[in-house]
Image (tube, helix red, strand yellow):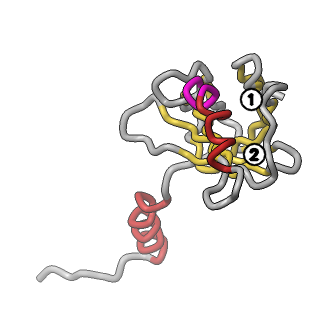
Amino acid sequence: MLRFHRPPRLLILLGFGLFLLPGCGTRTATVSGTVELPKELKLADTDIVQITFVPDAKGEKSCFAVFNSADKTFVCKDVTPSGKYKITVNIEPPLGLADSPKRAPEFAAFNKTFAPSSTKLVYQATDESSQSIILDLAKGTVSKK
């Protein structure tokens, strides 16, 4: 007659740990930095600045940065460590303000330069969990702080 005995607690814990392992999610990094704008480009406090990290690898998701217009800094979470990204920038005056229709054309050429199909801004993320860069939009460069 076969006898089955209870598995030791260690095996139960190990099995439970292996069950949870696939759900741990992927590791991400946070990229923060400053933005240097061209001198001729004047931002109003209400302007909407969108900075997007578009991954080179298929299947990866884009990451959107939160921009602070007061000090021209940004924070982008959920960047894949060691991933390569194109960085896009789009600036729009908010809808509904009296001068918005007049100001929108001021940003058109700028937005075209940093659109997904034409941006030259490229960032190679590192394995560090926290990274800091400078987006110099006047020169069209990305550099580490």
* Left or right: where 15 falls relative to 54: left
Q: Name the image quarter holding residue 8.
A: bottom left
Residue at image position (75%, 16%) is: 139
Residue at image position (79%, 25%) is: 38
Q: Name the image quarter holding residue 89.
A: top right
Q: Name the image quarter holding residue 95.
A: bottom right
Question: Residue 84: x percent and y percent?
Answer: 54, 28
* Left or right: where 25 falls relative to 92: left
Compared with 45, 111 (above or below) is above
Question: Residue 7: x percent and y percent?
Answer: 37, 76
Residue at image position (82%, 43%) is: 72
Q: Are marks 2 and 1 in contact (CB under 8 Å)?
A: yes
User: Is 33 one of the magenta-colored residues?
Assistant: no
Q: Does residue 102 appear in the picture of this structure? A: yes
**Numbered disc 1: secondary structure:** strand
User: Is 111 one of the magenta-colored residues?
Assistant: yes
Amino acid type at circle 2 is Phe
Residue occupied by mark 2? 74
What is the tally of numbered marks visible in this picture?
Answer: 2
For marks 2 and 1 on the same chain, the one whose residue lies earlier in the sequence: 2
Question: Residue 4: x percent and y percent?
Answer: 24, 81
Dot 2, how many residues are within 10 Å of its Cα: few (below 14), some (14-19), or many (20+)?
A: many
Residue occupied by mark 1? 135
Q: Residue furthest left?
A: 1
* Left or right: where 43 falls relative to 102: right
Residues rendered magenta in the picture: 109-113
